[in-house]
Amino acid sequence: MDEERGPALYPNREGGTRAGLSRRRLLTGSAAAGAAATAGCLGGGPAEQPEGDAVFVFNTGDGTVSVLGTATDEVVTTRSVGLSSSFPANQYAPGLTTAPEDSLWLNVDMGVRAVAVGSLSTVASVDTGSGFNWQELTPDGAHLVVSAREPAHRQVRIDADRGSETFGQVTAELDRTAEGGRGGRDGPGPCDISVHPDGEFAYVPDLFGDTLTVLRVDPFEIATQVEVEPVTANPAAPWMGTVAPDGRTLLVEHNEGPGTESLWDLSDPSAPELRARLTVDDGLGRGALTSEIGPDSATGYVFTPDSEDVSVLDLQEGTVVDRIDLGGAAFTGTWDPAREKLYVPVQTTDEVAVVDHAAGKVTATVPVGDAPYGATAARVRPDPQAGAALWAAAAALGLDGERGTTYCIGNCACGHDP
């Protein structure tokens, strides 16, 4: 079983969390609390926040969310939300989240939750039977499709339409345990999900099945399943994937040895065909985990936290063309709603690196909360709320009570052993 990168799959088995109250958190939290009180946050409300596009960064170390304005690449507010998310839905959410009542979908505890972007309050919650969850919206916002890894080994479809009478309810599911998995596992380990721009198909890398599964969204069923062969001495172990905006290419990351990457042709969206496979010998960074694809559908960005960089791919040629140094480990990223800049939470430096797609480099670094991990974006920002800064300071001090946890691949205060 995944011997080389086992700690990445189950980071908390060997005490790999950032739990506890550190001196750094005590000092920064105390300073923030003082500043909040001085600013009058205990009395009248804070100044009105400007409107505009925003990126939401979930800080797994202190249970806050940092909201960045994309026009200035600055934090406009930090809020304690009582939960965190490592892999929020971010493929189509930025274009769908245009009103305060619209939802950000997050992986929290043993399932997924929706929070209203205007208030950051929970409006729906679904228990999937697993602590390892990935979710994505369909392009029309009608459905949320979920991969629930072990022990559930389940695909779930949820009504994501806020105007529907069945909003937040499971409308279909697939139990995949009968497929089994490598090493006698009790299922194939569906891990991550990416939805084709046509909204008809979704792609699931199966970590323990060494397969790439194509789901048909409606009716909810398996359309195709492709065997994935290894290119090292380790199993292929596909675990994350991203479809290009033009729907022609699928990137898949593999927990194989030091990490590998595969590029798939989607000329027939129901039948992916392998075009190229990249390893560290091809210049790929170490620990390929997740990816994003540029607005031109010609450039891939693969987050390679073990080498603390982003590997940049030419999707047409199937080659690594650059490595962007991040100065720390980053596991995910998200595009701003305009799809001009890629926002990358660097968990080990408590910053967000802003990669300008046109410039091909980091153009800004933004300090955020403790251990930032997941990120998504929206066209609207949370409503101003009295005391928000003080609540964020209390979270940094560890005084906000229990928080909803989230599964993280890497070193963070998460949880969910299988």
Image: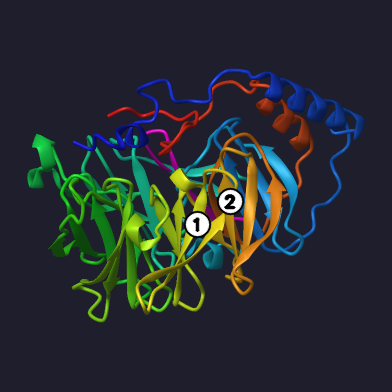
Q: Compare residues 288 and 141 and report the one nearer the observer.
A: 288
- Residue 310 got which mark? 1
Colour setup of the view: rainbow
Residue 38, position as x, y percentages in the image: 91, 30
**From what the image shows, is residue 21 above or below residue 114?**
above
Q: Mark 1 packing: few (<14 Cα in 10 Å), some, or many (20+)?
A: many
- The quarter of the picture where residue 394 lies is top right
Split into 4 quadrants, where in the image is the C terminus? top left
- Give the CA separation, mark 2 to mark 1: 7 Å
Residue type (three-letter) at the residue carrying disc 1? Val
Q: Is residue 79 magenta?
A: no
Magenta span: chief secondary structure:
strand
Split into 4 quadrants, where in the image is the N terminus? top left
Residue type (three-letter) at the residue carrying disc 2? Leu
Pointer 2 with pointer 1, Cβ within 8 A: yes
N-terminal of the two: label 2 or label 1? 1
Does any portion of residue 255 appear in the rendered image?
yes
Q: Which residues are magenta?
A: 100-112
Q: Residue at x 66, y 58 (%)?
A: 54
**From what the image shows, is residue 269 above or below residue 412?**
below
Residue 32, position as x, y percentages in the image: 80, 30
Q: Residue at x 54, y 51 (%)?
A: 375
Q: Residue at x 62, y 39 (%)?
A: 349
Q: Secondary structure at mark 2?
A: loop
**From what the image shows, is residue 24 above or below residue 223?**
above
Q: Is residue 111 magenta?
A: yes
Residue 399 appears left or right of 16: right
- Residue 326 got which mark? 2
